[in-house]
Image (spheres, grey):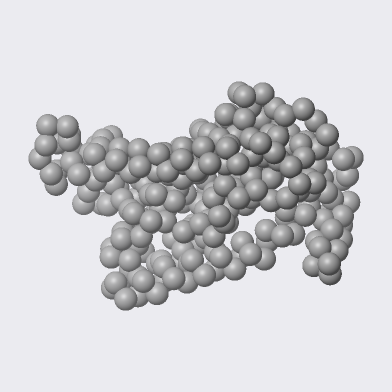
Amino acid sequence: MSIVIEGAVPELQPPHDTGGKEPASNVAQGAWVLYEWANQTYFSLITIFLFPPFFTGVLAANPIQGQAYWGYVQAVSGISIALMSPLLGAMADAAGPRKPWIVFSMLLCAAGCFGLWFAVPGQPLLPVAIALIIAAIGMELTIIFANAMLPTIASDRRIGLLSGIGIGVGQLAAIVALILVLLLLQLPGEVQAPFIPDEPLFGLSKEAHETDRIVGPISGLWFVVFMLPLLFLVPDQKGRGLGRREAAKAGVMRLWSTIRS
């Protein structure tokens, strides 16, 4: 599950300020909202409904071990995110632009998601756990950096509205993705109905659990594709002329100042 409150907006500018600039266009603000459509499929398919039962009931030696390992994965992911987020957030603030950080964390998440295709029963759980942790870290960092863009593109009267719309759009995406995967991949061969195919889409094998493993690549691809509007249409902050080392140093100092205060 996500440890970040969906729609929460870090205060990176003075309260209700767009950084001295005019709010972005409606198209750009709509592209920002669409990022919620991009990320919620990951939570729906991988962390809540489909991959956890496969992990605990099929990949693990027994359900008890599976539940324990799943708990370890969530704990390591949560601790890693808690330790990394403040520092990386401060570094991003110091550097200025958020999109380079978003691209990095997005690709990190996608790599972890695609790695779940190799979650073959009978193989060690550690590589699968690592892929899950990588995906979780990448997803949460993407959410942090994307949320940090909102105060710079919207006025104070629009921030709450856009956050609320984004949450609704994200929940709709989670439902749509779950229904599509169930109808086209999970239920064929199990349930007879006029709207359900006789065989899983793409000829995937249920015996090899390909219909379970494919939810990782589906989530990763969905995430990358629907993040593109944000990357191409939402204006980013200008750079502050800091190199990587200077940005890192400034970020550490800013974080330390925040902690002391």
In this orientation, which residue lies closer to the viewer: 192 or 202? 192
Determine the residue positioned at 70% across, 27% down.
Answer: 24
In this orientation, which residue lies closer to the viewer: 223 or 127? 223
Determine the residue positioned at 80% across, 30% down.
Answer: 21
> Is 167 left or right of 67, judged from the image as shown?
right
> Is 243 left or right of 114, judged from the image as shown?
right
- Tell me if residue 239 can be seen: yes
Q: Residue furthest left?
A: 192
Q: Is residue 64 above or below residue 212?
A: below
> Is 158 left or right of 123, judged from the image as shown?
right
Q: Is residue 241 above or below residue 70?
A: above
Rendered-image quadrant of the C terminus: bottom right
Q: Residue furthest front?
A: 157
> Is 149 left or right of 3, judged from the image as shown?
right
Number of marks in picture: 0
Q: Position of residue 10 (x, y in %)?
A: 69, 51
Q: Position of residue 111 (x, y in %)?
A: 53, 48
Determine the residue positioned at 64% across, 35% down.
Answer: 158
Q: Position of residue 4 (x, y in %)?
A: 57, 56
Determine the residue positioned at 67% across, 66% down.
Answer: 83
Q: Is residue 168 above or below residue 122?
A: above
Quarter of the view holding residue 188: top left
Q: Position of residue 35 (x, y in %)?
A: 55, 38
- Tell me if residue 121 can be seen: no
